[in-house]
Image: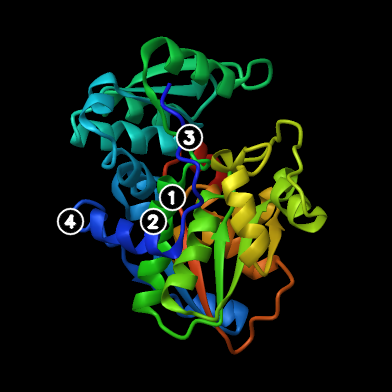
Amino acid sequence: MTPIAPHAPTAADVLAAAQRLQGVAHRTPVLHSGMADELLGAQLFFKCENLQRTGSFKFRGAYNALAQLDAAQRQRGVLTFSAGNHAQAIALAARLLDIPALVVMPEDAAAAKMAAARSYGAQVVTYNRFSEDREAISRRIAQERGMALIPPSEHPQVIAGQGTAALELLQEVPRLHYLFVPVGGGGLFAGSLLARQALGSSCETWGVEPEAANDAQQSLRSGQIVQIAEPRTIADGALSTALSPLAFALIGQHAEGITTASDPQLVQALRFFAERMKTVVEPTGALAFAGARHGGIELRGKRVGIIVSGGNVDLARYARFLSD
């Protein structure tokens, strides 16, 4: 198994990732909603990574990491573990770079996400998230096959690539007062903090995670990584039980704070996106907006950036969210 690079990512790594991703990743649109502005009494700018390749920001980090593998490692292949979005991203990036890929996914992962990973050409191995250790399974297979293990958050070039979403938003919409970012394993949040640093922005940057999975919030408050039991929330892209150490180091040093959103608040946000903005967003992708709306942070009169992290949701499940 190829070891993970030991160094922490930097603001310069985010800028380099942006160059590497030019012409490969979509420069996703920034949308505006007058109704959202009225609800919060602020100006909101939505960075729509639900319109990114594979339907989420994860493609940015996956491609940035895989593009830097040497020829020998590309031939042996890559492996990751993911509930869905990172799996799809690794699968597509590997196909574009002609690299064999294997993804370890929970057996109850969203069917659309699992089907997409397979359609991009990856081999899928499933496990029971409540009784098996996905990282142990991944390490064993990677060791046996000599594959490079590219985890969803604990990899400097994955984090750097994820940060390019916030970088683009901050470039397109200068003078933001606040930026809200979904938090699962912490890679997107950590990368967004580096993007802010790269551009010399002074906007307050807040993470938002599910109320039932607030390990990152607990970790930031305690000053050390807190691991929780396997959470249950509709935000299936934020089911991590602990922050990655690389992400935690950056978040602990640079973040203003982390707030949470409940499942009912996420459903409310999904309905807003569908009814008012005519766009499909997955529950995890709605975290930042729900956190800005309900997190108790005074935003009136401010310019606020919202990272909409993804739009991969089973249509039957999505219909239930909208109709319940």
Q: Which mark is residue 68?
A: none
Residue 145 shows up from this direction: yes
- Give the spatial CA distance, label 1 vs label 4: 20 Å
> Circle 2 is placed at which residue position?
49
Q: Residue furthest top?
A: 144
The earlier-in-sequence mark between 1 and 3 is 3
Q: Amino acid type of disc 2? A: Glu
The numbered mark at residue 151 is: 3
**Residue at the spot x=27%, y=62% of the render?**
27
- Mark 1 near mark 4, Cβ–Cβ under 8 Å? no
SS state under label 2: helix
- The three-letter code of the residue at mark 1 reads Gly
Quarter in which the C terminus is drawn: top right
Determine which residue is flagged by label 1. 310
Residues at badges 1 and 3 in contact (C-beta under 8 Å)?
A: no
Image x and y of residue 228, in percent: 76, 37
Name the residue beneath numbered marker 4: 23
Q: Residues within 10 Å of mark 3 (few under 14, many from 20)?
A: many
Q: Position of residue 258 (x, y in %)?
A: 69, 61
Residue 315 seen anywhere in this rendered image of the structure: no
Given contact means CB atoms under 8 Å apart, are the residues at marks 1 and 2 in contact? Answer: yes
Local SS, label 3: loop
Is residue 313 or residue 308 the one in the foreground? 308
N-terminal label among 1 and 4:
4
Q: Earlier in the sequence, mark 1 or mark 2?
A: 2
